[in-house]
């Protein structure tokens, strides 16, 4: 009876690797750090199925290199166990954002829009109707009453952000 009790109490040692997600997405040039949890695993090696699409840095960070779908693999060091997850590497996004959706510019005054760029080297400003406002040293100068559009053009891209000027 005691032996049967011990058999019920002593269970076989189990091993496990879990990832915080089943699918990951990273942009070309960007990095992610999957959260890896282990049970009775001494250590692990993080790998990707195609090193032309992504690379592993310091066994914890994955950097997107080229567009495509591949797998993240976590290999246990002390037992035959591999956990996999899908990784999609997407094109690098290029974004222009402004601090406001609309700017109010008085006649003969200057307003300097705050422009934030993601993966764009520089920008130029242009005003659609130069009879209402003009660009001077990356600032908007009011010329006459009325409305027009401010365009922010990303250097070397076709990315354009437009906002209203009043």
Image (spheres, grey):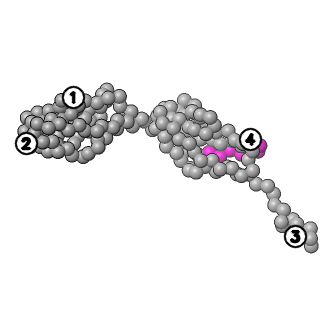
Q: Secondary structure at mark 4?
A: loop
Q: Nearer the viewer, residue 136 or 71?
A: 136
Q: Earlier in the sequence, mark 4 or mark 1?
A: 4
- Residue 52: image location, x then y, percent: 54, 29
Quadrant in which the C terminus appears: top left
Query: Does the segment drawn in magenta span residue 83?
Result: yes
Image quadrant where residue 48 sits? top right
Q: Earlier in the sequence, mark 1 or mark 2?
A: 1
Q: Which residue is mark 2?
A: 145
- Residue 108: image location, x then y, percent: 11, 36
Q: Earlier in the sequence, mark 1 or mark 3?
A: 3
Q: Residue at x 67, y 38 (%)?
A: 45
Q: Secondary structure at mark 2?
A: loop
Q: Could you tell me if the residues under marks 1 and 2 are in contact, i.e. CB atoms within 8 Å?
A: no
- List the single residue furthest toward the front: 109
Q: Which mark is residue 137?
A: 1
Q: Could you tell me if the residues under marks 3 and 2 are in contact, i.e. CB atoms within 8 Å?
A: no
- Residue 82: image location, x then y, percent: 68, 44
Q: Nearer the viewer, mark 4 or mark 2?
A: 2
Instruction: Write down the region rendered in magenta.
Output: 77-84
Q: Nearer the viewer, residue 86 or 143?
A: 143
Q: Residue at x 29, y 41 (%)?
A: 98
Q: Nearer the viewer, residue 11 or 40?
A: 40
Q: Which residue is mark 3?
A: 5
Q: Which residue is mark 4?
A: 77
Q: Could you tell me if the residues under marks 4 and 1 are in contact, i.e. CB atoms within 8 Å?
A: no
Taken as a whole, is the magenta stretch helix, strand or loop? loop
Query: Does the segment drawn in magenta span residue 74?
Result: no
């Amino acid at each position: 009876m005691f032996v049967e009790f011990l058999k019920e109490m002593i269970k076989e040692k189990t091993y496990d690797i879990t990832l915080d997600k089943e699918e990951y997405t990273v942009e070309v040039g960007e990095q992610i750090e999957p959260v890896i949890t282990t049970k009775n695993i001494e250590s692990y090696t993080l790998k990707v199925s195609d090193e032309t699409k992504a690379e592993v840095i310091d066994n914890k960070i994955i950097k997107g290199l080229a567009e495509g779908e591949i797998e993240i693999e976590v290999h246990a060091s002390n037992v035959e166990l591999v956990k996999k997850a899908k990784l999609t590497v997407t094109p690098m996004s290029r974004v222009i954002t402004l601090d406001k959706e609309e700017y109010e510019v008085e006649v003969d005054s200057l307003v300097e829009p705050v422009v934030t760029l993601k993966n764009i080297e520089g920008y130029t400003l242009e005003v659609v109707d130069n009879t209402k406002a003009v660009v001077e040293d990356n600032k908007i100068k009011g010329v006459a009453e009325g409305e027009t559009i401010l365009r922010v053009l990303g250097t070397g891209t076709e990315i354009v952000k437009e906002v209203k000027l009043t």
